Image: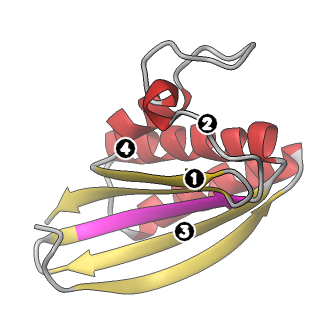
Amino acid sequence: MHSAQVSVVSRQSHPVRTEEDLLNVRHEVRAATVEGGFGLVDQTRVVTAASELVRNAFVHGGGGTLLIEVLRGSEGTGIRLTIHDEGPGIPDVAEALTDGWTTGSGLGHGLGGARRLMDEFTVDTGPGRGTTVVATRWTVR
């Protein structure tokens, strides 16, 4: 579906630098899912994925930026989350996406859990250039 023509209905950028930013981002993502007409279950999926992703950027990447976009296409509405940090990068993306993998005190639901909650998911990372994750969830109208 999503290779079809898609337009960006709204776009917001939010810093992820403090614990307070993490809370604010959750509220902004929830508001975007409401704007996009997502049902409660999909709202919860997207907010949960966003929470995991921004926490990773905050804890492992030293903070970053979240771009929230509401998308409209011929077949439905989407929410695209783009999280970027300037951290050290992820040495082994495949390992980081494995269920139960954690770098320390986490539950191991981070990247893999976020990927399962979204329809489209890409990770671009490397030493010296940080990490960018793009995750999109669609709802069919």
> Is residue 80 covered in magenta?
yes
Residue 88 placed where, x, y %?
Answer: 75, 46
Is 41 placed above or below 103 here? Answer: below
Residue 33 placed where, x, y %?
Answer: 43, 60
> Is residue 4 covered in magenta?
no
Q: Which residue is mark 1?
A: 125
Q: Quadrant of the N terminus?
A: bottom left
Q: Which residue is mark 3?
A: 68
Is label 2 or label 3 in front? 2
> Which of 95/9 is in front?
95
* Residue type indicated by callout 1: Thr
Q: What SS does tag 1 mark?
A: strand
Q: Tag 1 or tag 3, which sits nearer the N-term?
A: 3
The label number, if any, that marks residue 91 in the structure image = 2
Q: What SS does tag 3 mark?
A: strand
Q: Tag 4 or tag 2, which sits nearer the N-term?
A: 4
Q: What SS does tag 4 mark?
A: helix
Please provide the residue range marked out in magenta. 77-85
Residue 20 placed where, x, y %?
Answer: 86, 48
Cα separation, mark 2 vs mark 3, equals: 26 Å
Q: Which residue is mark 4?
A: 40
The label number, if any, that marks residue 108 in the structure image = none
Q: Do the numbered discs 2 and 4 sit on residues whose CB atoms are within 8 Å?
A: no
